[in-house]
Image (spheres, coloured by chain):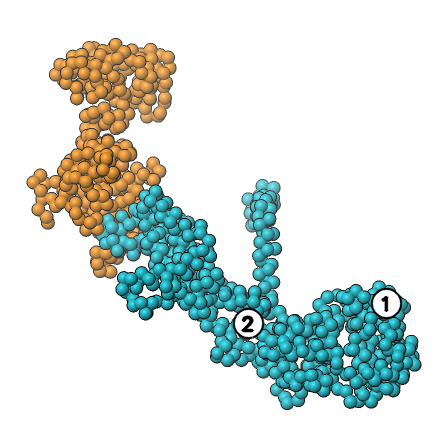
């Protein structure tokens, strides 16, 4: 039946498509519920971590998080120029670093930046230790000027109030401090940053608020009982020397005295000098440039490193030839995987053919022999190849004994590419034989007979009739073996030496040893893209419909 | 071409034996000779050795003993691709990765025939099986009947003198099978080729062949034209295997030239034609075709032996009536009568008398 618009309708007048969908909905729901547990498991344990890892390859917010003010101040600085950064940059760096050092976050940043410029790690570590000593003269002058500053409660009485109308003065300080500490910080319950202090002593108020939050949230102490950090003292000195003191709250008298005493030492003090006294490298354009280059929360740096480039303050550049490694490794992984795949075809095809054409009993025996290695631990099999292939190993001994090679010129079969290819061909061979076998099993012998009865020689019959029909098996085997081998890591690690390792070994190194997960993620992403690209090319050339795992 | 053998046979099996395991013979002492242009069918139940014979002729199996000659030449040691024998397989065996035209072109290509020649021959062969429009299709896009036509064309395209067919119509439905049976015989006669056809379907064998070889247990039980096979089976296996048949068992009590008397196990006495019984006292199976049994007393001669029978079942089949009777102790004695206007329609339970001409009743081996 059709309605006025020409759409086909069911007996009750609904469109037929809608009726069909309704009828099938229950079926679909049930099918979906059946796969739901697996779907949830895979999403949680596999897909989500993969996306997390992929995200790490571009995520790089450690600099902007740990040195938030410095990164902003560095906006005006030009790497290409000749100036060192302004005093404002070093001031921001001092406060950022001071808080980061208290929160023990500065070494992580140092390690991260050390991937890009060597020496940054120790620079951050050493500077972190001596931040307390910066502006010593100023702080001593302040202590001499007023006894009250030695009293923790005095500081608290200036900056903190119980008046809840002063609610949001600490918001900026809180955002800043939380970013560096990488956790939510807050003032003790019922304590607020005082209005008077926030308006007239802005720097000190911010630093004290950060100190108080950290003391409360991380150290879990009472701020009024703890001595404020040196950074708070210096910030107060900044405020006191910034102009006329309009502060008239608690302790105004004492602060006036301090103001008088601190003017002279502050005139001599600059943050720039303090940092440069500590380490000349703080004036190094590379060091500051590196901080500026990696100040964005997202970076292409890991991907550039993964293809032997580096992100420098001047843009992407090739790294020195003697440290180029990743492109070489990618190429090696590709050509060795292809060699392994090809060897597997050469060795596996005749076996699969034999199995497909023998009576079942004998074919099953061969099948067991093919599967036997599967039931042995991968590590054991790989180690066995070490015994066989080494210079004093079974194969070399036999060759020498036969007289094929001299005792002095034993073949290097292990700890190089040869070793990896031999061992991996052996390990991956079943993945080639099984799909080949099942496809060949589905080719009736009558095709070969027909070809011969039509006048084809054995070879022509095989090549023109049998082989084309076994191509789907070769395709399936190739995809399995190639994709498995491109990501293989244990065997190359054990028998590959330095010349026979794959990119996956490098990824493993960055995951577990150098802890440069961003780079590992970038390498992994590239590998994933390469494999997907090859898969796509395979689909275009061979056609994925032509891949069969079974007859 | 080659020197013909003495008797002019085109295909010849001489004392051929075949064993797969060295313990049992699948083919026992096979002797067969076919003139050129004959359509010979090997008929038999599965495992009777007929397909093995075909495979030996094609060259896919080697004879354990004996000679196979083609056109006078022993071919035992010639590999299959040099025998020049066309073959049609039960599952068609069309190469799935080639188009229909490529399939047909294949035997011509391996014979190094030029491109234009090839195309002409392929076209002619496709037209011959009325599949001219299907050259560009893949075998998977064709129906079973179409595939079998293509397989037939492929086996004929290189103009072999001998074509072997291994149950080629086994997978098709009845109507299609009948059409193709007719087409295959027509082609074979038109082209003058010699055909060896293997089947287990006796109707197919009877309707298509010049001669039928009935196989059983590795031997040819009877080799004869279809009418002779049906009307004059030479032993009880052939009688049972070809067509429907009523069997009564008994002992020969008298032999008198063309007529012998048989005392059935039930005690009744009948006349029969002795085929492979020769002496009094031998046990025999008497075979009568259902359509040769008569129950209209007026149509039987006066001296004919008759048997009492009880109607168990009467089936109306349109053109014929099929009546099952209880006769001389058996419950499955079948009578077929033509649906003629004057024919009596029997009712179950009715007691009747049946009889037949002595020459229609053959006394065979027990």
Which of the 4 quarters of the picture holds residue A239? bottom right
Q: Identify the residue at the far left of this view.
A: B6
Residue B241 visible = yes
Q: How many marks?
A: 2
Above or below residue A488? Residue B58 is above
Instruction: Give the colour of chain B.
Output: orange
Using the image, determine if residue B359 lies above or below residue A521: above
| Nearest to viewer (mark 1 / mark 2) | 1
Q: Determine the residue positioned at 66% across, 89% down.
A: A83
Residue A489's spot in the image, x, y percent? 48, 62
- Residue appearing at x 40%, y 65% in the figure: A414
- Residue B81 screen position, x and y as percent: 21, 51
The answer to whether tags 1 and 2 share a subunit is yes
Residue at (72%, 87%) from the top-left corner? A273
Q: Tell me the quarter of the image containing the C terminus of chain B.
A: top left
Q: Which residue is mark 2?
A: A303
Q: Which quadrant holds residue B49?
A: top left
Q: Secondary structure at mark 2?
A: helix
Q: Look at the image and tell me whether residue B157 can be seen.
A: no
Q: Within 10 Å of the Cα at label 1, are there few (<14), some (14-19), or many (20+) other Cα atoms?
A: some
Q: Which residue is mark 1?
A: A191
Q: Secondary structure at mark 1?
A: loop
In depth, the one of A277 and A336 nearer the eye is A277
Query: Does residue B354 appear to the left or right of B66 in the view shown?
Result: right
Q: Residue B355: give x, y in percent of width and height.
A: 25, 14
Chain letter of the cyan region: A
- B206 vs A342, nearest the viewer: A342
């Amino acid at each position: 039946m059709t309605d006025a618009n020409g759409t086909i309708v069911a007996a009750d007048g609904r469109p037929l498509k809608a009726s069909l969908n309704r009828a099938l909905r229950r079926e679909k729901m049930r099918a979906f519920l059946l796969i739901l547990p697996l779907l949830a498991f895979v999403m949680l344990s596999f897909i989500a971590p993969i996306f997390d890892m992929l995200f790490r390859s571009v995520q790089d917010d450690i600099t902007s998080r740990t040195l938030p003010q410095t990164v902003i101040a560095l906006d005006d600085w030009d790497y290409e120029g000749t100036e060192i950064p302004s005093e404002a940059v070093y001031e921001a760096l001092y406060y950022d670093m001071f808080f980061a050092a208290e929160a023990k976050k500065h070494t992580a940043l140092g390690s991260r930046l050390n991937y890009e410029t060597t020496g940054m790690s120790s620079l951050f570590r050493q500077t972190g230790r001596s931040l307390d000593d910066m502006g010593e003269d100023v702080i001593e002058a302040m202590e001499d000027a007023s006894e009250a500053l030695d009293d923790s409660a005095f500081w608290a009485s200036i900056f903190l109030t119980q008046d809840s109308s002063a609610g949001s003065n600490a918001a900026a300080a809180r955002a800043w401090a939380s970013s560096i500490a990488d956790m939510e910080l807050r003032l003790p319950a019922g304590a607020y940053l005082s209005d008077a202090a926030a308006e007239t002593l802005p720097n000190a108020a911010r630093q004290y608020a950060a100190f108080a939050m950290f003391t409360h949230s991380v150290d879990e102490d009472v701020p009024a009982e703890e001595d404020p950090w040196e950074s708070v003292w210096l910030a107060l000195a900044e405020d006191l020397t910034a102009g006329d003191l309009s502060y008239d709250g608690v302790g105004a008298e004492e602060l006036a005295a301090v103001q008088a005493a601190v003017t002279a030492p502050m005139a001599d003090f600059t943050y720039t000098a303090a940092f440069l006294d500590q380490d000349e490298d703080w004036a190094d354009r590379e060091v500051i440039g590196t901080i500026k280059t990696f100040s964005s929360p997202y970076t292409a740096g890991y991907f550039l490193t993964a293809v032997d480039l580096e992100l420098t303050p001047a843009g992407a550049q090739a790294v020195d030839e003697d440290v180029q490694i990743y492109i070489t490794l990618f190429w090696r992984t590709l050509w060795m995987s292809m060699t392994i795949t090809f060897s597997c075809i050469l060795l596996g095809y005749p076996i699969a053919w034999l199995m497909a054409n023998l009576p079942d009993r004998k074919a099953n025996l061969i099948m067991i022999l093919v599967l036997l290695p599967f039931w042995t631990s991968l590590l054991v099999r790989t180690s066995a190849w070490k015994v066989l292939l080494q210079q004093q190993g079974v194969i070399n001994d036999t060759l020498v004994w036969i007289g094929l090679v001299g005792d002095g010129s034993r073949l290097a079969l292990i700890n190089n590419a040869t070793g990896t290819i031999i061992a991996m061909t052996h390990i991956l061979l079943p993945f080639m034989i099984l799909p080949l076998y099942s496809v060949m099993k589905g080719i009736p012998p009558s095709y070969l007979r027909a070809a011969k009865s039509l006048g084809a020689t054995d070879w022509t019959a095989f090549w023109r009739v049998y082989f084309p029909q076994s191509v789907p098996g070769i395709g399936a085997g190739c995809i399995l073996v190639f994709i498995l081998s491109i990501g293989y890591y244990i065997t190359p690690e054990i028998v590959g030496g330095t010349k026979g390792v794959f990119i996956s070994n490098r990824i493993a190194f960055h995951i577990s040893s150098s802890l440069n997960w961003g780079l590992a993620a970038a390498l992994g992403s590239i590998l994933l893209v390469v494999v997907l690209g090859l898969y796509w090319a395979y689909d275009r050339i061979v056609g994925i419909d032509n891949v069969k795992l079974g007859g | 071409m080659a020197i013909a053998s003495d008797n002019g046979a085109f295909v010849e099996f001489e004392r051929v034996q075949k064993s797969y395991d060295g313990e049992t013979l699948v083919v026992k002492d096979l002797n067969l000779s076919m003139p050129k242009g004959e359509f010979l069918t090997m008929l038999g139940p599965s495992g009777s050795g007929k397909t093995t014979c075909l495979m030996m002729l094609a060259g896919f199996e080697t004879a354990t003993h004996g000679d196979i000659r083609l056109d006078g030449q022993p071919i035992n040691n010639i590999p299959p691709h040099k025998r020049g024998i066309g073959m049609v397989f039960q599952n068609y065996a069309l190469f799935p990765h080639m188009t229909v035209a490529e399939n047909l072109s294949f035997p011509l290509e391996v014979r190094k025939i030029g491109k234009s020649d090839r195309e002409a021959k392929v076209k002619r062969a496709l037209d011959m099986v009325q599949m001219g429009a299907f050259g560009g299709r893949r075998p998977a896009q064709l129906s079973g009947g179409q595939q079998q036509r293509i397989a037939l064309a492929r086996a004929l395209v290189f103009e072999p003198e001998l074509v072997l067919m291994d149950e080629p119509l086994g997978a098709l439905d009845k109507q299609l099978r009948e059409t193709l049976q007719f087409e295959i015989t027509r082609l074979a006669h038109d082209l003058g080729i010699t055909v060896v056809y293997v089947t287990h379907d006796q109707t197919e064998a009877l309707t298509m062949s010049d001669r039928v070889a009935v196989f059983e247990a590795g031997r040819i039980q009877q080799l004869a034209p279809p009418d002779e096979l049906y009307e004059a089976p030479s032993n009880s296996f052939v009688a049972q295997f070809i067509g429907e048949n009523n069997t009564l068992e008994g002992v020969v009590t008298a032999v008198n030239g063309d007529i012998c008397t048989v005392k059935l196990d039930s005690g009744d006495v009948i006349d029969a034609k002795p085929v492979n019984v020769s002496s009094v006292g031998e046990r025999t199976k008497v075979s009568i075709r259902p359509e040769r049994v008569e129950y209209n007393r007026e149509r039987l001669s006066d001296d004919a032996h008759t048997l009492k029978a009880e109607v168990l079942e009467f089936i109306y089949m349109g053109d014929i009536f099929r009546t099952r009777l209880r006769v001389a102790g058996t419950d499955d004695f079948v009578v077929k009568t033509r649906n003629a206007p004057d024919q009596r329609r029997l009712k179950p339970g009715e007691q009747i008398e049946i009889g037949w001409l002595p020459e229609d009743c053959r006394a065979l081996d027990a």
